[in-house]
Image (cartoon, helix red, strand yellow):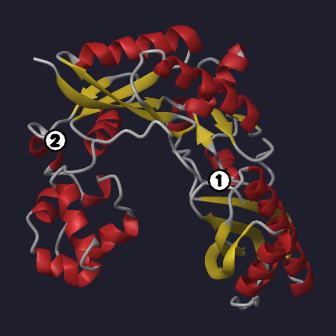
Amino acid sequence: MARRFVLHLDLDEFIAAVERLRHPELEGRPIVVGGDGDPTKRGVVSTASYEARAFGIRSAMPLRTAYKRNPDAVFLPVDERAYLEASRGVMDTLRSFGFPVEVAGWDEAFTAAETDDPERLAREIQARVLGRTRLWSTMGIGDNRLQAKLASGFGKPRGVFMLTSETWAGAMDGQPTSELWGIGSKTAAKLEALGIRTVAELANADPEVLAGRFGPRTGPWLARLARGEGSAQVHPEGWVARGRGREHTFQQNLTDPDEIASEVERLAREVARDVSRERRRAVRVIVKVRFAPFFTNTHGVPLDGPSADPGALAGAAARALAKFELDRPVRLLGVRAELDDPGPA
């Protein structure tokens, strides 16, 4: 009997896979993509192929660290235009099935369908995407988005995995809470301080204790996550960015406060242009400062009103920067704008 399922498509090592299609001679070699492709410069890993991950190379790792772990890896610069074009081909293929599609990023999307054989449908989607784009994907299947998202993690790479309300406890109860979509390392640490380490412990935790530690809304929501409960809605309008940001890693540390302020202003104005192109407006500006050797902090300020005006964003960034004590050399600066709902600017 047909019933409704949510399916999550997650492209395998997407950026590295796109680069491998562009450079077939790299097949089987460890690939690291990040910065301008020079591992002797400051920058971070955007993605690493499975071959590179075998050496302990991971996303967000400094390129220099990645190089130390495997100097024989192939280091390539980020090419966002190529990845966006490849992503569009995948999403167009997924839409060809006629189901609602919610794009969740370059390399992932949700869809939903009524079927009596969801695994067969998932393999049909996987095969069509591979045939048209030459990109492998993993498919997760669930009764809701949470289950489907986690299922694709179990299915990596190139697999199909089904995680439903009926199988949730067997698959998830013994997992650490950090394995739940929506719980990061900081929240997991706070839960552990309460004696809650596993998904089962969180699912059975005292609601009043959770509400007291995390608030009356977040506390119960965490318990619902642990029980596998979540929305089954798929929104065809797709993924909408909650923010836009720019950052720059300096090859030589900055120590002059005026130079730091000038760089923050430049980044803020670039972000304002990005916001304007999307016909969006910023409501808050956050400045990120990474001090040498590798300590990072952020401060943010609200705007007086939603705006895409470069001067307004630059002014807000300056106010946020004033919250820092610039008493150490600076190796990275970033500016991020949190955005209002899509609409005319």
Residue 213 x %, y %: 25, 82
Front position among marks 2 and 1? 2
Nearer to the camera, 92 or 137: 92
> How many C-alpha atoms fall within 10 Å of the one at disc 1: few (<14), some, or many (≥20)?
some
Q: Is residue 179 visible?
A: yes
Q: Position of residue 103 (x, y in %)?
A: 50, 37
* Residue 317, quarter of the rendered image: bottom right
- SS at mark 1 in the image: helix
Q: Quadrant of residue 61?
A: bottom right
Residue type, label 2? Ala
Q: Residue at x 36, y 11 (%)?
A: 124
Quarter of the rendering containing residue 323: bottom right
Q: Residue at x 67, y 78 (%)?
A: 305
Task: Please identify the quadrant where the N terminus is shown.
Answer: top left
- Name the residue at 21% across, 84% down: 212
Residue found at the far front of this picture: 344
Q: Is 264 displayed left or right of 194 in the figure?
A: right
Residue at (62, 33) in percent of width and height: 15
> If you read the primary sequence from the N terminus, does the residue marked by circle 2 or circle 1 appear first?
1
Q: Is residue 156 above or below residue 245?
A: above
Instruction: Report helix, strand or loop for mark 2.
Output: helix
Mark 1 sits on what residue? Answer: 65
In this orientation, which residue lies closer to the viewer: 153 or 239? 239
| Residue closest to the far top | 131
Give the residue at mark 2.
Answer: 171
Q: Is residue 116 left or right of residue 183?
A: left
Determine whether, in the image, residue 73 is placed left or right of residue 42.
Answer: left
